[in-house]
Image (cartoon, rainbow, N blue to C red):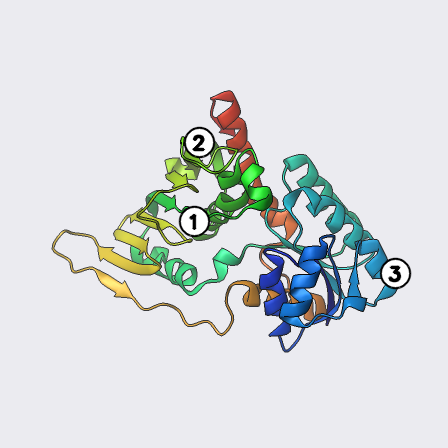
Amino acid sequence: MKVVQVGIGGMGQVWLQTVQASPQVEFAGFVEVSEAAIEAQIMRFGLDRALIFRSLDEALAAVEADGVINVTPPQFHREISITALEAGLPVLSEKPLAPTMAEAREIVAAAGRTGVLHMVAQNYRYSPAAQTVKKALDPAVMGAVGSLTVEFFKGPHFGGFREVMPYPLIVDMAIHHFDLMRYFLAADPLSVFGRSWNPGWSWFQGDASASALVEFAGGMTVSYAASWCASGRETSWNGDWRFDCERGVVTLINDQVWVYPHGASETPQRIELVAMPYAAQAYLLREFYDAVTNEIAPATTCFDNIRSLSIVCNLVESFQTGRAVRM
């Protein structure tokens, strides 16, 4: 299977590594507008300059491809994804699906109209830690989840588009955590309410800290506290999770999963992480390959992922209006 990768700088480097390591997928070509990124990746990955184009239209006119990997900044996701879909090429797109619900709906409509696959790279679902949490939350063992608390604190210095976004934490990062909420709870939320702010020491222009309540069916509420300009005591990228269940507590702390059975006298059990032959981007690429070549439906199609994006967009509305927003 041959793909065109659109965007080879920044996060694009991860996908360059992932595809080059894949036994099933290879590159037909690349699209990049930054000459600095082109020069850097030619040196780092040995890319063929003759296969690097300035636009997706130019690339598709010059090479034969079976799919497109969209690793552009969010504001370009709609344009690139719809161009590929209308050319009949399946798309594996970096998250978020789009920066707004209106643009996301256009992508979903294009996927529905063309009948061509569009899936979103929600790689946080496919880590040993996340798969172990999902297994530990077996309702037959732990019963129903009554409440969930999530904390995420990091202080990354990315540079580039993230540091000028209005809500970088929520739009570019928290989409992972909100998608995990839906995945772990096997449910969609009913409403969201939150506040965002930017500490005085923040190097982001937009709000890099937030607190939110996400209500799910049955009265179960998720409490989410996060910052992308933490000054110390950082969590892992997955964050720290506590599930209060009918028959005990499940936690994910520092990427380790613990089960605390009901009753204070019970000894907590550390759960061995699930073994995964493929994880993160490698898992997603394998899933994309299986979907394109074997017609095995992936979990994170645009039709599903727009529900995760709706949490982000409705939470931004709550920040701006000061009111709870129904989904």
Residue 5 placed where, x, y %? 71, 61
Instruction: Single out the mark in the foreground, 2 or 3.
Output: 2
For label 3, the crowd category at 10 Å Cα-Cα, with few meaning under 14, some 14 to 19 and many 20 or more, is few
Q: Secondary structure at mark 1?
A: helix
| Residue corresponding to mark 1 | 185
Q: CA distance from mark 2 to mark 1?
A: 30 Å
At a point 20% along the width and 59% down the height, the residue shown is 268
Residue 184 visible here: yes
At a point 60% along the width and 55% down the height, the residue shown is 10
Q: Which mark is residue 61?
A: 3
Amino acid under disc 2: Asn
Asked if residue 61 lies left or right of residue 148, the reply is right
Instruction: Single out the mark in the foreground, 1 or 3.
Output: 3
Are the two marked residues, 1 and 3, in contact with CB atoms closer than 8 angstroms? no
Position of the N terminus by quadrant: bottom right
Residue 27 placed where, x, y %? 72, 70
For label 2, the crowd category at 10 Å Cα-Cα, with few meaning under 14, some 14 to 19 and many 20 or more, is some
**Disc 2 or 1, which lies upstream in sequence?**
1
| Residue corresponding to mark 2 | 198
> In front: 327, or 213?
213
On the image, which quarter does residue 287 sit in? Answer: bottom right
Amino acid under disc 3: Ala
